[in-house]
């Protein structure tokens, strides 16, 4: 008996993400067991079990699958998936983690017409980079008017970068940079002198 999930990490979101559970049932000789009835339980980090799933039957090749949706804003931490068949139990775990978004500019202050480079990272708390995610970047001037609104994506190490030139008549004062993805936001500031 084996069990696994499609991903090792999911995010707390609204609505919750889908989790695909798959597994196999084989005899001790390795022959697939067709029509086996599997019970699946998912236990949250606090030890509480999610509502039990209807029993699942294996296909002709001994494989089973079940997809469920995590609750909205699912509790962060490690979840345990248990598959049971004929007195045997297989377990696997997955985590629900909120990504960490960092954001900075290459300099703390700039003069009008200079180039501002905004950069940051998107990773899970334990350091796993999140690639291919779209990051919205907004820059507002001291009067809170948008001077830049762009989208960029994270690279293979979870990093992103975007440059722009300040206007030749850029207003002096404090500018705010906001980056957001899903339900995570980071801010940074820089000065124009």
Image (spheres, rainbow, N blue to C red):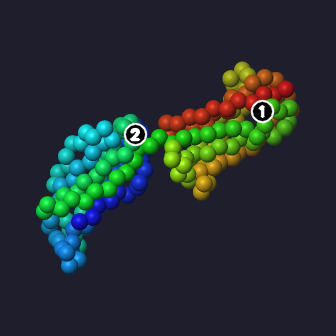
* Residue plotted at (70% across, 35% down): 148
Query: Number of callouts in the render?
Result: 2
**Which residue lies at the image location 83% right of the left edge and 33% below the top edge?**
110
* Image point (60%, 54%), residue name: 157
Q: Secondary structure at mark 2?
A: loop
Say whether disc 1 or disc 2 marks the residue closer to the N-terminus.
2
Looking at this view, is 172 or 187 the one in front?
A: 187
> Camera-side residue: 82 or 118?
82
The local crowd at label 1, few if under 14, some if 14 to 19, many if 20 or more residues have their Cα within 10 Å, is: few
Q: Which residue is mark 1?
A: 108
Residue 15: % across, % down? 38, 39
| Element under disc 1 | loop
Labelled disc at residue 171: none
What number is the disc on residue 76? 2
Q: Work out which quarter of the rendered image holds the C terminus and state it.
A: top right
Determine if residue 33 is in view. yes
Q: Is residue 73 left or right of residue 48?
A: right
Q: Residues within 10 Å of mark 2 (few under 14, many from 20)?
A: some
Q: Position of residue 137 (x, y in %)?
A: 64, 38
Residue 61 left/right relative to 69: left
- Residue 91 position, x and y percent, is 28, 57
In 3D space, how far apart are the residues under numbered discs 1 and 2 (Cα atoms)?
35 Å
189 to 130, vertically: above or below: above
Quadrant where the N terminus is found in the figure: bottom left
Locate residue 138: give its quadrant.
top right
């Amino acid at each position: 008996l084996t069990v696994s999930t499609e991903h090792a990490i999911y995010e707390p979101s609204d609505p919750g993400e889908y989790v695909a559970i798959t597994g196999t049932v084989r005899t001790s000789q390795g022959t697939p067991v067709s029509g086996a009835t599997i019970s699946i339980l998912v236990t949250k980090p606090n030890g509480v079990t999610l509502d039990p799933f209807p029993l699942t039957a294996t296909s002709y090749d001994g494989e089973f699958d079940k997809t469920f949706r995590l609750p909205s804003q699912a509790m962060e931490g490690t979840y345990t998936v248990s598959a049971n068949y004929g007195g045997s139990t297989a377990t696997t775990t997955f985590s629900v983690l909120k990504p960490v978004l960092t954001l900075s500019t290459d300099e703390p202050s700039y003069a009008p017409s200079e180039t501002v480079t905004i950069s940051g990272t998107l990773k899970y708390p334990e350091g796993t980079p999140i690639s291919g995610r779209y990051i919205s970047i907004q820059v507002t001037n001291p009067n809170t008017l948008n001077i830049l609104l762009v989208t960029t994506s994270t690279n293979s190490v979870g990093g992103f970068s975007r440059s722009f030139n300040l206007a030749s008549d850029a207003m002096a004062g404090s500018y705010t940079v906001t980056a957001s993805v899903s339900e995570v936001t980071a801010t940074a500031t820089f000065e124009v002198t």
